[in-house]
Image (spheres, rainbow, N blue to C red):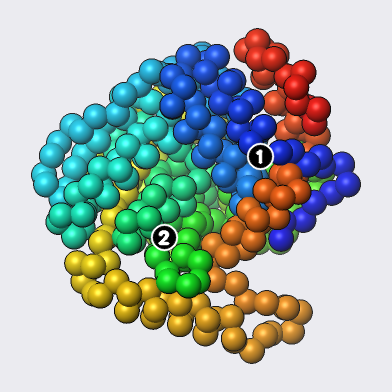
Amino acid sequence: MTNESDAERRVNADELLALVAAVFRRCGMDEPDARLLADSLVDADLGGVHSHGVLRVPEYGRKLTVGGVNPQGRPRVARDGGACLVVDGSNSMGQIGAHFAMERAVERAATMGIAAIAIRGSNHCGAMGYFAAQALAHDMIGVATTNALPTMAPWGGAERIVGINPLAIAIPAGRERPIVYDAAFSGSSHGKIRIYHQKGLKLPDGWALDSQGRPTTDPAAAIDGLLLPIGGFKGAGLAMIMGILSSMLSGASYGTELGNMVDGPKPGQDGHFVAAIRVGAFEDVARFKARVDAAIQEIHNCRLAPGFDRVYAPGEREHLNRIAYRRAGIPLNPVALADLRRVAAERGVETSQYGWL
C-alpha cells in the first residue's frame, strides 16, 4: 500500500470527484467532459498513483483557461482506414481525446478483431491505464501509450531529449483481477518527484540526475535535472519507440517538438496511441481467461524473496488501494489540499460542504 504521513488527510472519493468536476466546469468544460477529466484524476489517486491524480488540477485549470487548451474541443475521426484510424483531439484535454479514441477502437475491434488508433491535436492525458482498461469489459486487451515532454536524456547523454513516454496494457482475467500494467520508462515520473518534493522527502537512489548529470536524491534538483531510464539503454530505447508510436503515426509533435519543461508543452500538439484486441478473435475467451488466472496464481504462489510478504500481479496493488481508499478515504497531503482550495476559490466553486478542505 502507498506510504502515508500523519499530515495527510483522508478525503471521500465521491466528494473529491464532485469538487474537481465543478472546477473543470468553471473552466469552460461541458458536464460530461468535466466529469470524465475529474474521474481520471480521482481514479489515479484511488489507485495510489498520486503523481497523476488531483495534483494536476491547478495545472489543468491553467491549461483550460489561459494555456491555450480548448475546453470545448470535440475529438473527431480525421482518417478512417477501417481497423486503423487517426483521431484529431481538436485541442481538447488528452483524456477526452484518448477516451474517444479507445471507444472507437473497441467498436472496430468488435467486428475486425483488432483496431489501432493514433491521436493528434491533443494535450496531457494523465495515467494511461485508465484508457487501456476501457477494453476489459468487452473481453479485449487494451493498449495505450503517449508522448511526453522530454525529461530524460538518451543513454549516455546529458540533455532532456527523450520523454518518459509510458505504456499501459490491460488484459482480462476470469476469477482473478485483470492485469493492468501502466508504467513509464523512467525510474519515476516527474509527477511522483513533485509529490516527494511536496512532502519534503528524499528520492530513492537511481531515480534522477541533477542538471549537471550527477546522481541526486534531492527532489528540487531532480525537477531541474534529468529522470533516469529504467534498465539503462533498454528503457531509453523503449521510451523513444513509444514516443514515435504516439506522435509520428498521427502527425503529432515528437520529443523536443512538443516543448520543454521550462516553457511547457505547446497546446494541441500532444499525441497518443491506443489499440484494442478482441480475445475471441484469436482464442476461446473462457480458456484464455482461465490461463491468465493460472499465470496470476502462479505469481501469487511464488516462493518469496527475503524482505517480501507477497508477490503482486501488475495492477493488483492499485486494486487493493482502491478498496482501502474507497472505505477510508484518499490520503492527500497539505500542499495538494491547499492547491485545491485555492483553485476552487479562483474559479468561484463553493467548498463549505467539504469538511476536509
* Left or right of residue 243, residue 250 in this image: left
Task: Determine the image quadrant of residue 186.
Answer: bottom right
Give how far across and how far down residue 16 sits, in percent. 66, 33
Q: Which mark is residue 13?
A: 1
Nearest the viewer among 317 and 81 is 317
Query: What residue would you read off at disc 2?
Result: 170
Residue for point 65% across, 14% down:
349
Image quadrant containing the C terminus = top right
Image quadrant containing the N terminus = bottom right
> From mark 1 to mark 2, how far is it between C-alphas?
23 Å
Task: Determine the image quadrant of residue 174.
Answer: bottom left
Residue for point 29% across, 53% down:
275
Give how far across and how far down residue 195 sits, in percent. 71, 43
* Vertical side of 226 occupied by 298: above or below: below
* Vertical side of 244 occupied by 344: above or below: above
Mark in front: 1 vs 2 = 1
In terms of secondary structure, where does tag 1 sit? helix
Under mark 2, the amino acid is Ala
In terms of secondary structure, where does tag 2 sit? strand
Nearest the viewer among 112 and 52 is 112
